[in-house]
Image (cartoon, grey):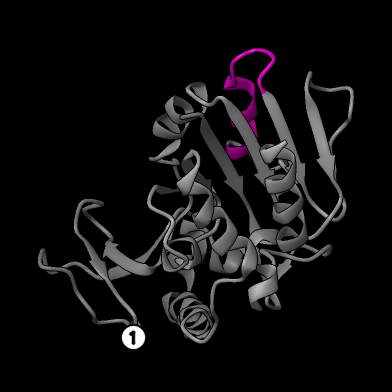
Amino acid sequence: MKRIVVLTGAGMSAESGLKTFRDANGLWEGHDVMEVASPEGWYKNKELVLEFYNQRRSQLLKVQPNNAHKLLADLEKDFEIQIVTQNVDDLHERARSSNVLHLHGELLKVKSVANDSLVYEWKKDLKVGDKAEDSNQLRPNIVWFGEAVPMLDKAIEIIKKADILVIIGTSMQVYPAASLIHYIQPDISIYFIDPKPNINQNSYNNLTIISEKASVGVEKLINLLSN
């Protein structure tokens, strides 16, 4: 059974009603990203950061996986599928994908500020004063700017074993996630799905660009894989 590795970004969840990470002017839901997605922002104003993620968490719990998520899960009938996502939502899991690696953390989990191994499922609001079992404040289980990406090495190992690479809804411009494509085996097939693809057709051998939103693009991908 062929092994397909799927890299997904914000465009994957956009059709579910989740906004993309940040717009053209660098704002995220009206905030400078460094205010709400950096250690410096956290220590400057914990209440602002917690409220920001409380709103994101509340929004996530109100939306559902879209057809692209469901179609990827269905592909497990015919392929070994491993998803490496930059998204912090749980929509791949809710669509029943079996193997999902979150590069940038998970919105529905929190962790101790002092111990990354103390991680808890969390679906309610998180407030100053909510503490882990080590008596330290809990924070969102999100990889912020300036922090190491703990799952990166595991993602690299997954990419190296891919027979086919599929990239959906990500510009592949944000590092270190963008570096993953450099670890694929030579000459494997690459499918790039994005309504505004930012990739050079001549950059890679066996590259197929599908200039569609995620749901339409995954439908076209399935047709190509079945031929």
Quadrant of the image containing the C terminus: top right
> Is residue 104 among what the camera can see?
yes
Q: Residues within 10 Å of mark 1 (few under 14, many from 20)?
A: few
| Residue lying at 89% horizontally and 29% vertically, measured from the top left | 201
Magenta stretch? 177-188
Q: Which residue is mark 1?
A: 124
Element under disc 1: loop
Q: Return the x and y of residue 57 as percentages of the image width and height.
A: 46, 79
Residue 145 belongs to the span the image colors magenta? no
Number of numbered markers: 1
Does residue 18 sit above or below 84 in this rendering? Answer: below
Does residue 136 sit above or below 104 in this rendering? Answer: below
Identify residue type, mark 1: Lys
| Residue lying at 66% horizontally and 20% vertically, measured from the top left | 188
**The quadrant where residue 111 appears:** bottom left
Q: Return the x and y of residue 104 as percentages of the image width and height.
A: 48, 52
Question: Furthest-top residue in view?
Answer: 186
| Residue lying at 42% horizontally and 62% vertically, measured from the top left | 96
| Residue lying at 19% horizontally and 74% vertically, measured from the top left | 131
**The quadrant where residue 152 appears:** top left
> Is residue 18 among what the camera can see?
no
Q: Return the x and y of residue 78 as percentages of the image width and height.
A: 50, 42
Frontmost residue, 32 versus 188: 188
Frontmost residue, 103 versus 47: 103
Frontmost residue, 19 versus 32: 19
Frontmost residue, 66 versus 176: 66
Residue 178 belongs to the span the image colors magenta? yes
**The quadrant where residue 135 appears:** bottom left
* Left or right for 77, reference 129: right
